[in-house]
Image (spheres, rainbow, N blue to C red):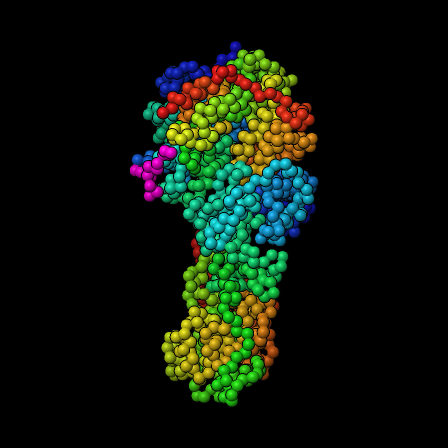
Amino acid sequence: MFEPVLTKNVGNPAALTLKGYKKSGGYEGLAKALQMEPDTIIEEVKKSGLRGRGGAGFSAGLKWSFIPKNITPKYLVCNADESEPGTFKDRLLMEYDPHQLIEGCAICCWAVQANICYIYIRGEYTKAATILERALKEAYEGGILGGSLMGSGFKLDMYIHRGAGAYICGEETGMLESLEGKRGQPRVKPPFPAVVGAFGKPTVINNVETLCNVPHIITRGADWYKSIGTDERNTGPKLYAISGHVERPGTYEYPIGITFREMLENAGGMYRGGTLKAFIPGGASAPILPASQIDIKMDFDTVAKAGSMLGSAAVIVMDETTCMVRSVARLAKFFNHESCGQCTPCREGTNWMELLLKRIEHGEGTESDGRLLLSICGQIGGNSLCALGDAAIGPVKSLVERFYPEVEQHVRERRCPFPQRRHFQNGA
Amino acid sequence: MPKVTINDRTVEVETGTNVIEAALKVGVQIPHYCYHPRLSVVGQCRMCLVKVEGMPKLQAGCSTQVMKDGMVVRTDVPEVEEAQKGMMEFFLINHPLDCPICDQAGECGLQDYSFKHGVAYSRFLFEDKRTYPGRERIPLGPNVILNMNRCIQCTRCVRFTQEVSQTAELGFFNRGARAEIGVFPGKPLENHLSTCVVDICPVGALTSTRFRFAERVFYLDKKPSLCTGCENGCNVTIEHRRGDIKRYKPRFNPEVNDYWMCDYGRSTFERYKRMPRLSTVRVRPEATGNGGFTGGWKEALDLLHRRLRSRDGGAVAFLGSGFLTVEEAYLFGKLADTLGSPHRSVPVDLGPTWTIPNTKGGISGTEAAPNRRGAELAGLAAGVSQGGPVLDADELLLGDGASNCSVLIVCDSDFGRAAHDPAVVERLRRAKLLVVFGWCDSPLAKAADIALPVPTHAEKDGTFVNVEWRLQHFGSAYPAPGQVRPLVDVLVDLLARFDGSWAKLSTGAVFDRLAAEHPAFAGLAWKDLPAVGVTLNVPEARAAVDATTASTTQEV
Amino acid sequence: MSVSEPKVTSTGLPPAAKAELDEIRKRYPTDEAALLPALHIAQRLWGGWLPDEALEAVAAELGLPVSKVYGVVTFYDLYHQKPVGRHRIRVCTNLSCQLRGSEEIMEAVREELRVEEDEVTPDGRCSYVHFECLGSCDTAPMMMVDETYHENLTPRRVRDILRGLK
């Protein structure tokens, strides 16, 4: 039986306080880390196989090892700008176990010798920000943060930086721009943030969940961590946020690599007894998978092999009443709305795709529209300045490639074949 | 220095050179909109995508730097051409098809690249083009008009005001497909370089209030020249149609004005249209001594020659001008030498200080004429008098100096504000014979005994020496009208009457004579003058050069 | 129509806000970095939106060109450039909520408030917009009223919530 690691304090309100968190074993990882050489920590994290939980799945330890030693100051920016549609796991971590995140950030800062950490939290998460703020205050007062990190003499300041509503600020360089008080327009890379990051200085940017893993890796060791998961490249506990047409949507913690079928069963099965039609395995940017993929192992590599991505592991489930064109049109609207507007393929392409999909959905599509959509995807894919362009084409491509008959049906019948579903009777 | 291979051609470039610049060195043009050599690299138009060997995706040529040997780049492969085609389609789907009424047509980046890289049909058939109602002709400031419908969001203009003029009036607003450029309400685009944003706008979004609808650009003749607005000597292109100047555009010279010029400079040609033109030889009947004057140039010069020789016991004074070329000033100086006259000066007006940014810390000019230094160097600096005061500009313009002149030669009828001041004209009129050369029929020219029509700077060739002692050459943009004769021709003609060796010398030959004789110009030859100009070997020039070297050394 | 009146003049931020901002500025190596927090403060002061004078005050305070501040304000969804209601309602309509009936929630809000999206009710009480994913997909459909998440909504609950707003 898998015992939750990251969410073990969910349902334990005492953990919100420093005292309660410590009682549950909190800050032991930090204490241990401070006895270790920074490089040893980086090696341990590398060895654990921890891959970024934000979406790209890049090795966290490797990222830390890119930070040059001879440049100061250095920064850690914790990416708490969780905005990928379908994703709500980081909010849970922050609202229920803020000290776990602070501890993870602190260990990372010590490992890369960064004296300042900014937690960039999306502007809408006011509750999480308040809880974190309170926890930070306690951590300062409790002698953990400030002039001497847990009495080690290492100076560490940690601040909350609230965003203001822009998905693109979840892109790491967009986030840095936003942190610096600018429009959140991603930067050209290289240089990479590890060398030229926040305020032109070396910067680590890690997702909330990634950092929350760190204390446990330090406390219990990389070998323990690696024992969880499918293989060497897919290790550790993972939060899966499941939503859409399921009976009990929510955040679930599993060893990475649980099958989608198990996950669905644990979430109470399909909503109101529906039949599975399709699911998105990793947030709005992930190509949609058909029901036939129900037994897929939900780890980075297996999902990638199936032609999608684990991304933020936000699973959106759709039943047979769902119009795929309409669903993808909604996602296209999202990407159009969130495109920062600086680079041509993303600015123009996401806009065009939304218009086109809406037209098809309204029954005004033509037979060549499917091809046109794919062609637009091809013109955006790989050519945009940041990853948003590639993200935006994920669902659209999968619609044309995997659900084409539905697109055709819209064109042929000159209407959406799916009746508008009413979820509520008499207002309830 | 690392070597890079672009389309099979290898070139050595400085470390950090980007692929667009490196490609230019081997004659490969990589299309681009947002990249500009003097603006920060943002990589956002995605038009410059190239294939770099070993990279999985296409790379932006602007932001890809050559850092070490062995980079292999291709721009002539199908995936690059596909990407360019795709980008062109994206640029055009929301761009109005209004070339026939667009001022940019003919010099438009979209037209050029669609022809080269785009396709001739549209797949954007059923959707409405994005428009910005009410934002089709917004004055951003006194000199620039925005049509947002045509904007391709390259943000060159925004970066220009942030990084070059450092006034930051322009901003990039909104997000995604609604992203647009503009000014904050009540904070117009009002810096002295503002029209540069029109130059760098690759499309018809920003147009110049002054030039708008003045002429279709494909009807313009373009000739390299220099701005005469101040002593900076900004390199410009004179764009005219049949001698009617429509606009000045800055011409790249990294040593002077880089890619830029000021709004004031752009307006200076309007003087040639606003002021009355002196286009015929005019001699007052009284001046001939024998009734009416019926001749032309020859007769006028004969008369002048006669009066200069006889001199009637008075002085001959030369009132120079900062608008003369070096060669013209040299010839006037020679004439003064011949007559033994120390009475020379070059009056110039002081204007506001215009600063043009360049990579060397900028160039600043305050004198409102392009060549005071050159004119003085070449021979119009005041000489030493053998008794009595030198009749210099102060004596002549403010005092009663002209009363002592038997002949007063004003070298330029529009040398400054004073030429239009009735009080000054009255003072100069006190000379026994007042001779005025010039293009402008100013009050001073009207008062002259002999008024001789010579070209504007757009109609002549020669050299100017700018505020940093840089000698720069310029040529005539179009022929002069009417009886106007090049001043160099006129002066060698006049000098030849004293000394036959001057006869029929060209401007170049005059310059070479000057160079042979004057240490500041030593070693220079007319036909070898460098395109970016050359710093003169004068103490002041040397001092300035030494000062920069010294400060650079300190920084290192 | 009672839209929120500006509370300070364009001469700058009031002392309390200035003090709050000064505290925040210490966190960053540049003044510009304090822009987002400064705008959050200014928006609170100006009654939920940012008129031009608010932008000018913030720009002056941080020594930034106002065009830059304007660029930032127009970039982010949480800053408003026109008057909003005393209560700001954001209904999540992204895919997870759409799959669970967010359109019906939008309808319920519209019916209850009787104004269109982005308009302010005549009494100045409410304004509403549809919004992108608010990270509460497990409790879809949901909406955010001011800073509070209201989850697992039904049209009836929406009515109750909206009627409870002062």
Residue at (66% x, 24% y) in the render: A406
B491 displayed left or right of B429: right
Residue at (64% x, 30% y) in the render: A364
Stretch in magenta? C1-15
Residue B305 in the magenta stretch? The answer is: no
Q: Can residue A64 be seen here?
A: no
Residue at (52% x, 54% y) in the render: B208
User: How many numbered marks have been drawn onto this rendered protein structure?
Assistant: 0
* Dominant SS type (magenta): loop
Q: Quadrant of residue A268?
A: top right
> Between residues B450 and B369, which one lies in front from this camera angle?
B450
> Between residues B67 and B446, which one lies in front from this camera angle?
B446
Where residue A99 appears, x then y in whole percent? 40, 22
> Between residues C131 and A306, which one lies in front from this camera angle?
C131
Residue at (65% x, 38% y) in the render: B125
Give the residue at the far left of this rendering. C15
Q: Please tell me whether residue C165 is drawn above or below residue B347 in the rendered image.
A: above
Q: Quadrant of residue C26?
A: top left
Where residue B20 appears, x then y in whole percent? 60, 47
